[in-house]
Amino acid sequence: MAPDELIVAVGTHGGEPESGFDPITGWGYNHEPLVQSTLFKRGSDAAVVNDLATDHTISEDGLIWTVTIRDGVKFHDGMPLTAGDVAFTFNKAAASAGRVDLTMLEKATAIDDNTVELILRNPQSTFINKLIGVGIVPEYAYTGSYGQNPIGSGPYIFKQWNKGQQVIFEANPDYYGPEPYFKKLTIVFMEGDTAFAAAKAGRVNIAEIPHTYANQVVNGKRIVSLETIEACGVTLPTEPNTGEKTEDGYPVGNNVTSDIAVRKALNIGIDRQSLVNGPLNGHGATEFTGVDKLPWGNKKAIFDDGNITEAKRILRDAGWIDTDGDGIVERDGVKAEFTLLYASSAQDRQVLAVAVSEQARELGIRIKVEGASWDKIQNMAISTPVVFKYGDIDPTDVYLRYHSESYDPSNWNNMIRYSNPVVDAYLQNAMTSPDEETAVEYWQLAAWDGETGYSEKGDAPWLWMASINYLYIMDEDMDIGTPVIQPHCGNIFGNILEWKRIDS
């Protein structure tokens, strides 16, 4: 293999996209699309930087975003990229209801070859993130099969896709940005133990690996731990089980977690640092609100945890008492016990779930840990606690998780149907604020305003545990520069134009 060629096994880079490498259906959401350009990107410090765009303005009422794009940019087939392609991309993405929510977009129009105007239905403080999340496709070449053989204007040209095995990209010689050091990039689709074995055998240059390999020593390789904003937490359904069923006939609500005393006891009693030190081998950080590391995280919502005595007092004061001596508290004949589901393919979720269940037992709460398919989880989440992971630089993620009207199991939004009208109002104000600074105030108030909120100090509908670092084993001579902030599913290629061999 030539020094400027790279083979990587990166499972969290979205994995193999079922519908191909099409931004309209979600390719590139939250991570570098490689093939396509985006209007803006985020730098290593998370600041918004220009990519295809050179400038933008926002009307005073927040409804009209005008973006100027680079002149002379070409798609990989040599055809010019114009504002018409940008307008087409956003209109198509809005109409397709893909992974990037563009329901707020009324219409995108090309004013001239280098200027596009995007008109919104309502002001959106988070709209800049949509301009980061959608790769630009060519209007003249976009068909239903585009994702199988995509054309873009990004740093890499799509060359070959062997489904279920690998995808091959080659550097774009006409790219308007810095020239990529690596001229050929092959992504192989393998995960976990298989990826580590391939790296150890020298078959891949970089591989994402489970935390169980954190302390492994492999000749010619080094292990890199990247901090993330991927927060791992447990849903705690706040509705009781009254016999209500979903449209598909599944139960709604949980008679244990619907008691706020149980939810608060778990939040206060669980020792998060021990979860980081143990199951994650130190490769993570404690997490209390799901957005602790982000600008809209509310530090006033963070609390002291690992207090078993206080947790037991909360339960006792609420009437949860162990009357039969089996170590599990009960109230009105109901045992404080429930099942905790996790995706059976996710090792990190499993180890955290097991560790939480062991700690909960000290509080008098029995948690049965169960691995399940995503289909089962999707059906059962409205009644059964689930280990989920979230991490998005777009605060819309917070709105979708906690706003009562965002409940949508098909898109994994507000899976427990959490509802608080005060929180709803804060979230709505945050979304429609005229600027990000004002929006941040509302995002923070939604977590805790001194009286209520979605954090433990308020309704405590989640038990947040930890943010999880991503671990990679790579060639010793690899220099990956300063990685961008790592969201859910990772963005290891976010700064690939900085990558090189150290000996070069």
Image (cartoon, helix red, strand yellow):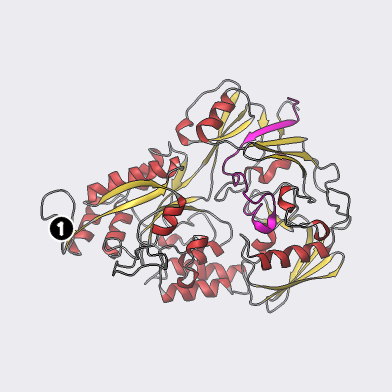
Q: Residue at x 46, y 64 (%)?
A: 414
Q: Position of residue 127 (x, y in %)?
A: 65, 67
Q: Is residue 313 above or below residue 466?
A: below
Q: Judge the density around disc 1: few (<14), some (14-19), many (≥20) Cα neighbours within 10 Å.
A: many
Type of amino acid under label 1? Ile
Q: Residue at x 38, y 38 (%)?
A: 278
Q: Position of residue 38 (x, y in %)?
A: 73, 56
Q: Is residue 146 above or below residue 280?
A: below
Q: Position of residue 372 (x, y in %)?
A: 40, 48
Q: Position of residue 437 (x, y in %)?
A: 59, 68
* Image quadrant where residue 245 sits: bottom left
User: What residue range appears in magenta?
Assistant: 1-30
Q: Which residue is mark 1?
A: 321
Q: Using the image as rendered, state which of residue 379 and residue 208 is in the foreground.
A: 379
Q: Is residue 250 above or below residue 357?
A: below
Q: Using the image as rendered, state which of residue 498 and residue 388 is in the foreground.
A: 388
Quarter holding the N terminus is top right
- Which residue of the protein is positioned furthest toward the left in this rendering? 324
Can residue 171 be seen by looking at this rendering? yes
Question: Is 13 included in the stretch rendered in magenta?
Answer: yes
| Badge 1 element | loop
Quarter holding the C terminus is top right
